[in-house]
């Protein structure tokens, strides 16, 4: 009795706190993210909509239909991701999609998704993609329209628009509704609060002035 109760609490408390994510197996047909109602049961931070209220629009989105603004960062790229807000029907399905626009000569800098593998398909342009595995081996490929490439889960990867004149477009599928992203230069140099200078100096074999210079470049 007591043991059973304890076991239930151990199982239920992380669920209520939203610490247990449903990837990779959904517990039911679907769980449409209910982004408005106040409920007591939360999964991954949001309650599920009453299935009787489900409609086709919950499973469709036009979020990826328009190009993103590639001028919003120093690298010349834009990533629009499906989320529980713009595609509530993809909750608990263990997937999401991304539209990646890259300006001419633009770069999606080295980054990793801790919770998802990714397959990307070049729709337009000429994209150099690559990742580094845990043996520090680099894998790169040039993608032309219609060609795809897999970035294994959690590994650092990049996409570079080789074309100096035309923008590039890629569409990615990711194996989590909440892939998470860590951009290597951003995470190392512009975290809040910042990583101690001494750590960066030793890690990259640079001096304090160079740390400050890189930080400034990344902000601008
Ligand atoms: C794109 O972003 C830049 C920088 O934030 C901004 O100045 C510009 O107006 C934006 N363009 C569009 C079409 O929204």
Image: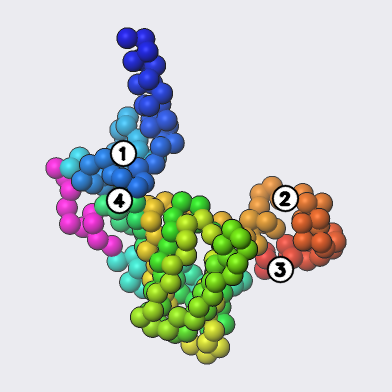
Residue placed under numbered mark 1 in the picture: 47
The answer to which image quadrant residue 56 occupies is bottom left
- Badge 3 residue CB within 8 Å of ligand 1: no
Most common SS among magenta residues? helix
Question: Residue 144, percent across and down?
Answer: 42, 84
Q: Within 10 angstroms of label 3, few (less than 14), some, or many (20 or more) residues?
A: few
The residue beneath circle 2 is 195
Q: Are marks 3 and 2 in contact (CB under 8 Å)?
A: no
Residue 214 visible in the picture: yes
Which residue appears at 20% of the width and 40% of the height? 50
Ranked by sequence position, the earlier of labels 1 and 3 is 1
Q: CA distance from mark 1 to mark 3?
A: 41 Å
Mark 3 vs 2, N-terminal side: 2
Question: Is residue 7 in the magenta section?
Answer: no
Query: SS for tag 3?
Result: helix
List the residue tagged with mark 4.
Answer: 93
First-in-chain label (4 vs 3): 4
Residue 77 numbered mark, or none: none
In the rendered structure, which segment of residues is drawn in magenta?
A: 52-61
Q: CA distance from mark 2 to mark 4?
A: 35 Å
- Which x, y percent locates residue 95? 34, 55
């Amino acid at each position: 009795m007591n043991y059973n109760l304890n076991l239930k609490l151990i199982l239920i408390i992380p669920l209520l706190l939203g610490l247990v994510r449903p990837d990779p197996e959904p517990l039911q047909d679907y769980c449409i993210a209910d982004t408005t109602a106040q409920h007591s049961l939360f999964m991954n931070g949001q309650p599920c909509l009453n299935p009787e209220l489900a409609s086709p629009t919950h499973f469709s989105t036009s979020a990826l239909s328009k190009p993103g603004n590639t001028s919003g960062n120093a690298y010349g790229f834009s990533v629009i991701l499906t989320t529980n807000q713009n595609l509530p029907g993809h909750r608990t399905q263990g997937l999401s999609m991304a539209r990646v626009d890259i300006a001419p000569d633009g770069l999606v800098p080295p980054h990793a998704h801790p919770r998802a593998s990714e397959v990307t398909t070049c729709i337009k342009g000429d994209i150099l993609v690559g990742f580094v595995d845990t043996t520090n081996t680099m894998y790169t490929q040039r993608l032309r329209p219609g060609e795809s490439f897999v970035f294994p889960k959690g590994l650092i990867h990049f996409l570079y628009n080789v074309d100096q004149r035309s923008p590039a477009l890629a569409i990615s599928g990711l194996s989590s509704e909440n892939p998470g992203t860590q951009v290597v230069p951003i995470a190392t140099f512009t975290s809040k609060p910042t990583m101690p200078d001494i750590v960066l100096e030793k890690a990259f074999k640079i001096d304090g002035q160079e740390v400050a210079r890189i930080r400034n470049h990344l902000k601008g």
